C-alpha cells in the first residue's frame, strides 16, 4: 500500500519537515560522490551496535565519535528507494504533526524519536556488526504521533493490482496500525534485523511517538513558533483531491472541493480522483470564484443500464486557513 496524501490539511507551511527532507537529499547526493569510501562512512557515522557492546572495539573511538552516530545515522541512506520511501512517508504525515507542535518542538520531537528508535535497536541487536542507517526510526515517531493526534483522518492509498493501481481512502488508524503490525511481524520472525532493515527501531520510534506526543504538546510553543506562525500560513490546498460523492438514486453525483481564499481569488487547477469512474481528472477553478459555486463535470457521474451517464457537481468550499 502506497500513501498518496491524507485528508487533514495543515494550517501552516511545514518549514522543518521540508528542511529535514532537503538535508537528507543533500546528504544522499554527497554520498553518491564518496565512491569506495562510502562503506567507511557508514561504519563511522552509522549506528554499529558492537561499537558499544565490545570494550575492545569501543576503545578505538573517542567519546564524540561514539555520540555522533546517534544523530548522524538518521541522515544517511543506503540507496535511492530507501531515501524516497522514508522522505515520502515524512512528507505525508510530517506536516500535520509539525502543524500541531510548531517548528521548534517538532524538530526536537523528530530528533528524539530517532534517538529512541536507535536505542531500541541497540538493545535488540547488541552484538550486530551491521551499520544501521536511515530516517525511518525518526519518521516512525512522527507516524506514532499522527496515529494519536488524528484518529479520524483518512489516507488516500494506492494499491497496485497487477498493472492496475486502485485508489482507496483508508482510515489513518487502519493504515498506520497495519504498518506497525507488519513491522512487528517481521521483527519477531527475523530476530530484529533482516535484509538490513532494523524492524525493532521502527517499532521503538512509533511507540516513542505515541507515548510522548501529549507531553510535547504540554510544553508551550517557543517564541520562534509564535513569531513565524502567521508567516508560515498555507496559501493553497493539496493538489490532489479525493472526492467522496454524496449518495443518491440519480445518475448525477455531488461532492465538495476545498480551496483557500487565495485560490478563490486567483483561480487554481486541481487533480480530482473520482472513485465511481476509477480515474483522476484535472479541474480548473476560475478566478474570483465564490463559496458555494458549483462546477459541473459532464459524464463523470453514475451509469445507467441503458448507457446513460450522469454528471459530477463539485461545490466549492473556501477554507478559512488559520493558526492554532
Image: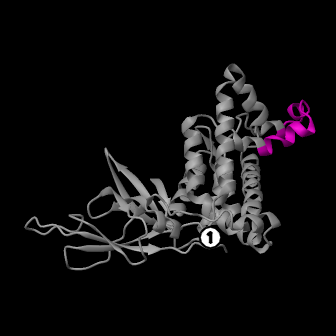
Inspect this view and state whether residue 166 appears: yes
Q: Is residue 53 magenta?
A: yes
The image quadrant that residue 59 belongs to is top right
- Give 322 or 181, whichever is nearer the viewer: 322
**Left or right relative to 263: residue 55:** right
Which of the two residues, 144 or 315, is positioned nearer the viewer here? 315
* Magenta residues, start to end: 52-71
In the rendered view, does 17 fall on the left or right side of 222? left
Q: What x and y, as percent, mark residue 91? A: 58, 53
- For the stretch drawn in magenta, what is the main secondary structure? helix
The 10 Å Cα crowd at callout 1, few under 14, some 14 to 19, many 20 or more, is some
Residue 30's x, y, as percent? Answer: 69, 30
- Please state the horizontal and vertical placement of residue 121, each as a whole percent of the image: 72, 48
Count the labels in the image.
Answer: 1
Q: Which residue is mark 1?
A: 148
Looking at the image, is 14 positioned above or below residue 193?
below
Q: Nearer the viewer, residue 9 or 161?
A: 9
Is residue 195 depicted above or below 221 in this figure?
Answer: above
Residue at 46% in and 57% down: 239
The image shows residue 5, relative to residue 223, as above or below, that is: above
For residue 19: magenta? no
Identify the image quadrant of residue 108. Answer: bottom right
Residue at left 70%, top 26%? 38
Instruction: Locate residue 18, reporting x and y percent.
Output: 64, 51
Does the image show residue 134?
A: no
Q: Secondary structure at mark 1?
A: helix
Q: Is residue 177 left or right of residue 61?
A: left
Amino acid at each position: 500500500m502506497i500513501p498518496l496524501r491524507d485528508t487533514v490539511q495543515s494550517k501552516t507551511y511545514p518549514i522543518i519537515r521540508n528542511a529535514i527532507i532537503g538535508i537528507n537529499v543533500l546528504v544522499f547526493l554527497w554520498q553518491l560522490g564518496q565512491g569506495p569510501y562510502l562503506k567507511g562512512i557508514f561504519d563511522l557515522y552509522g549506528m554499529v551496535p558492537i561499537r558499544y557492546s565490545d570494550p575492545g572495539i569501543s576503545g578505538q573511538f573517542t567519546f564524540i565519535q561514539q555520540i555522533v552516530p546517534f544523530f548522524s545515522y538518521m541522515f544517511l541512506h543506503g540507496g535511492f528507494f530507501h531515501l524516497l520511501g522514508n522522505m515520502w512517508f515524512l512528507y505525508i504525515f510530517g506536516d500535520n504533526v509539525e502543524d500541531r507542535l510548531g517548528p521548534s518542538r517538532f524538530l526536537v520531537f523528530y530528533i528524539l524519536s530517532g534517538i529512541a528508535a536507535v536505542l531500541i535497536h541497540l538493545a535488540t541487536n547488541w552484538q550486530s556488526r551491521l551499520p544501521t542507517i536511515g530516517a525511518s526510526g525518526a519518521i516512525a515517531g512522527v507516524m506514532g504521533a499522527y496515529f494519536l493526534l488524528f484518529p479520524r483522518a483518512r489516507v488516500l492509498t494506492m494499491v497496485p493490482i497487477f498493472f492496475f493501481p486502485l485508489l482507496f481512502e483508508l482510515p489513518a488508524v487502519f493504515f498506520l496500525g497495519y504498518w506497525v503490525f507488519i513491522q512487528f511481524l517481521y521483527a519477531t520472525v527475523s530476530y530484529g534485523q533482516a535484509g538490513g532493515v532494523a524492524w525493532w527501531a521502527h517499532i521503538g520510534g512509533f511507540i516513542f511517538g505515541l507515548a510522548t506526543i501529549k507531553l510535547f504538546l504540554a510544553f508551550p510553543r517557543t517564541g520562534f513558533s509564535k513569531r513565524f506562525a502567521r508567516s508560515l500560513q498555507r496559501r493553497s490546498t493539496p493538489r490532489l483531491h479525493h472526492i467522496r460523492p454524496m449518495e443518491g438514486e440519480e445518475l448525477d453525483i455531488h461532492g465538495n472541493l476545498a480551496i483557500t481564499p487565495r485560490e478563490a481569488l486567483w483561480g487554481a487547477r486541481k487533480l480530482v480522483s473520482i472513485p465511481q469512474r476509477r480515474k483522476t481528472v484535472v479541474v480548473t477553478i476560475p478566478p474570483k470564484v465564490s463559496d458555494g459555486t458549483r462546477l459541473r463535470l459532464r459524464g463523470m457521474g453514475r451509469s445507467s443500464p441503458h448507457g446513460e451517464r450522469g454528471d459530477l457537481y463539485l461545490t466549492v468550499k473556501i477554507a478559512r486557513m488559520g493558526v492554532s
